[in-house]
Amino acid sequence: MPLAFTVMPAADLEQIVNLCKRRGFVYPSAEIYGGFRSSYDYGPLGSLMLRNVRESWVRTMVQKRDDVVLIDAAILGPPQVFEASGHLANFSDPLVDCKKCKQRFREDHLENPAVCPGCGSEGTLTEARAFNLMFKTFAGPVEGSGAEVYLRPETAQGMFVNFTNVLQTSRKKPPFGIAQVGKSFRNEITPGNFIFRTREFEQMELEFFVPPAEGPKWYEYWCNARMQWYVDLGIPADMLRLRAHDADELSHYSAGTADVEFAYPWGWGELEGIAQRTNFDLNQHATHSGQKLDYFDQSTNERYVPFVIEPAAGVNRAMAAFLLAAYEEQQVGDEVRTVLHLHPRLAPYKVAVLPLSKKDTLTPLARSIFESLGERYMVDYDDTQSIGKRYRRQDEIGTPLCVTVDFDSLEDGAVTIRERDSMEQVRIPIADLESEIRSRLGF
Ligand code: ATP
């Protein structure tokens, strides 16, 4: 029978930030030097979780489909790419300065444009000016014009400039997609809300190329598919919504955009954007490079520039949402149990192997179970402290299953499996352990 427990209120951001620091998910960057504002380093558990977010995306978007291929393009790019894409001219946010406190803000994020959100003064904000968000640096030993390069502000341009390469080498034809996961950089005016908005972040983007007439159909398809991805990975549907952009919010290339939004502790906010980029990017790069970027359909004898539907998600932002949705504090007896109900695919460790005691007699069996499960899964091995404390630690980092090796195991060849969410414990023959774990995790 499941144990009785009371559920306590849902997570606020502070709880997640604290848990992330305490358990090794996320640390402030360069902390020993006082921190580097709004940058974060991902620790032993956070780096595993980020990897799981990426892998879950690749699994859904590439592995389980035959119409999408993956690339990994360069982060540094020459100005020509971003001139063609429009980023050099248009990729800016409206910046206002407070003449009194000198702080800077994004005009489109102000609650009241007459009042400085920093110092509360009235009428001290300057007129907005366009602030370009791209990071510029120099390639080679000489700084100066001719040596400028840019850190990509999105991964998308890598797909557009490689359109013909991929078309020729992958033998795909529209509708087909090119996917990429990797770092992007934006000199955000107001980074913040933990890992929600940082200047260095990771994106998971798909450029899906379709015959122009099929644009609206595929846009709808991807809006639905992308919402479902978050639900399948454990975010309750009522914490998600799809919001279509108003005309004045649209990017310079977009014929329609919708955001998948998540109910963050501070309100609804973007988790992912799905944009109809039309044939803007391919046309721009064709014009600027002088190369043809189109598709010849042999079945209809037609040449056309495909339209693009782009679902663009953030790895870090998704991780924040998964953590916020998974976090729970439960009153169990006279104790509070913190548990992360992470989907097994996202949990840093799938299984923890816990020998009941540190005594040498249990170690060889526990280690051999750890090693054999480690062939398939990321497994934690923990023989410190009391078993109760070790269960709580695994609950707090979201490990779906614990395997406890005790002295009886040496006699009866069985171990105890404990489930994170229900806390139920069952005894299983070691010979059946792997198949039992596989069926409980679902993979
Ligand atoms: P926002 O309106 O929040 O600035 P955006 O509309 O500019 O985001 P897109 O260009 O659509 O964002 O980027 C796609 C996704 O990349 C976003 O939905 C988000 O998940 C992620 N992303 C964008 N900027 C950042 C950032 N500064 N930090 C973390 N993730 C980001």
Image: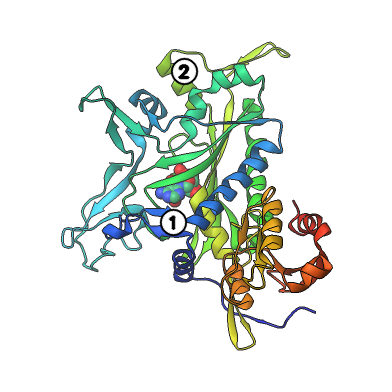
Specify the amino acid type for callout 2. Answer: Ala
Left or right for 108, reference 274: left
Discs 1/2, front:
1
Which label was assigned to residue 11? none
Residue position marked by numbered label 2 in the rendering: 286
Q: What residue is drawn where x is 55% and y is 18%?
A: 164
Q: Examine the rendering and report whether any part of residue 435 can be seen.
A: yes
Q: Ligand 1 near label 1 (Cβ, under 8 Å)? A: yes
Give the x, y percent position of residue 358. 61, 70
Cα gap from disc 1 to disc 2, whole angstroms:
36 Å
Which label was assigned to residue 195? 1
Give the x, y percent position of residue 120. 24, 69
Of the pair 300 and 41, the residue shown nearer to us: 41
Q: Quadrant of residue 384?
A: bottom right
Q: Examine the rendering and report whether any part of residue 280 can be seen.
A: no
Give the x, y percent position of residue 207. 56, 33
Q: Please rate how many residues cluster around mark 2, counting C-alpha atoms within 10 Å: few if below 14, some from 14 to 19, many from 20.
A: some
Colour logic? rainbow
Q: Is residue 190 above or below residue 388?
A: above
Q: Is residue 353 above or below residue 377?
A: below
Left or right for 438, reference 7: right
Of the pair 370 and 203, the residue shown nearer to us: 370
Of the pair 383 and 195, the residue shown nearer to us: 383
Q: Please rate how many residues cluster around mark 1, counting C-alpha atoms within 10 Å: few if below 14, some from 14 to 19, many from 20.
A: many
Q: What residue is drawn where x is 57% and y is 69%?
A: 396
Give the x, y percent position of residue 373. 70, 53
Question: Where's the N terminus, which quadrant?
Answer: bottom right
Label 2: which secondary element: helix
Q: Quadrant of residue 186?
A: top left
Label 1: which secondary element: helix
